[in-house]
């Protein structure tokens, strides 16, 4: 049931069918119930496609996040994306030691020389690459500004991992009153999951939701199935402005990369 919650936007769209059936069948009570249901679902889902219209002026800061699929993402394609979008930081999930070597061989080391890595074989590896000096998760910007960037990748909410998935999301740090904090990665959750909304309630906003791109799917990519659900996110401190969010397909991985162009408070 937890995984099925990801289909809520499609259920909202499908809720128009019972309205049509009830109207054509001349069943007024059923039609009223169907209309209320459809409107309720629309109010839950459609705001993600329009954004909140608020932009906080500040210092430009770009975040790139991508799940590398056990380190198999094409390193040249990813480095080319880094050259094109010029992110300040890259949050990498499923980062393997071999992927680090291949990314540096493709030129990432010259573009983003600072890093905090926990590369592992399998799906557990994480890393933050940066153009600017890092002290743990804290990025020191030219001129002295600071921002904290946390790479995120809880397990998928399968039956055997459901408790670990909830615990992992609950353990993410709350927004900080000291410096802006950004959580970026494959959350294995959509905005229809209460566990992710509870994270947002601790001082965050979903960048794509704010930018009107909250319904743009990020998984699965490069597959026979169409891209269907939005599980890759950049969560920002509520003080951080959001200019634009875009997604990019990379060869070798089943997740689309997320680019969030932000405005840090001065």
Image (cartoon, rainbow, N blue to C red):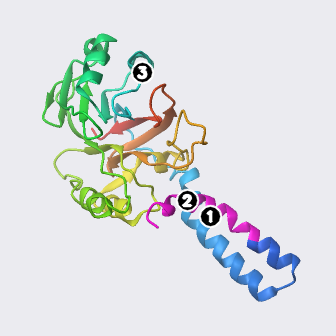
The one of 160 and 116 positioned closer to us in this rendering: 160
Residue 100 shown in magenta: no
Which is nearer the N-term, disc 1 or disc 3?
Answer: 1
Q: CA distance from mark 3 to mark 2?
A: 29 Å
Residue at left offset 29%, top offset 62%: 166
Q: Residue furthest left?
A: 135
Q: Position of residue 244 (x, y in %)?
A: 48, 37
On residue 11, the disc is 1
Q: Residue furthest bottom?
A: 29
Residue 7 shown in magenta: yes
Specify whether 262 is left or right of 248.
left
Q: Which residue is mark 3?
A: 74
On residue 7, the disc is 2
Q: Residues within 10 Å of mark 2 (few under 14, many from 20)?
A: some
Q: Position of residue 52 (x, y in %)?
A: 50, 53
- Which span of residues is magenta-colored? 1-17
Q: Which quarter of the rendered picture does the C terminus lie within?
A: top left
């Amino acid at each position: 049931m937890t995984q099925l919650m990801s289909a809520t936007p499609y259920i909202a769209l499908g809720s128009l069918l019972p309205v049509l059936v009830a109207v054509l069948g001349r069943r007024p009570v059923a039609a009223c119930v169907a209309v209320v249901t459809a409107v309720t679902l629309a109010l839950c889902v459609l705001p993600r496609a329009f954004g909140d219209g608020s932009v906080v002026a500040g210092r430009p800061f770009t975040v790139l996040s991508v799940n590398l699929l056990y380190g198999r993402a094409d390193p040249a394609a990813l480095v080319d994306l880094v050259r094109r979008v010029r992110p300040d930081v890259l949050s990498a999930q499923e980062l393997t030691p071999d992927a680090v070597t291949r990314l540096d061989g493709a030129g990432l080391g010259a573009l983003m020389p600072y890093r905090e890595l926990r590369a592992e074989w399998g799906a557990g590896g994480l890393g933050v690459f940066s153009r600017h000096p890092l002290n743990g998760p804290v990025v020191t910007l030219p001129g002295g500004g600071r921002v904290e960037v946390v790479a995120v990748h809880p397990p998928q909410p399968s039956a055997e991992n459901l408790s670990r998935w909830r615990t992992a999301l609950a353990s993410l740090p709350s927004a900080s009153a000291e410096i802006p904090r950004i959580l970026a990665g494959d959350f294995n959750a959509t905005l229809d999951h209460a566990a992710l909304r509870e994270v947002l309630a601790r001082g965050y906003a979903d960048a794509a939701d704010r930018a009107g791109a909250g319904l743009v799917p990020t998984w699965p990519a490069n597959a026979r199935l169409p891209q269907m659900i939005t599980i890759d996110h950049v969560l920002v401190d509520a003080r951080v402005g959001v200019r634009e969010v875009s997604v990019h397909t990379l060869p070798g991985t089943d997740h689309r990369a997320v680019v969030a162009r932000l405005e840090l408070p001065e």
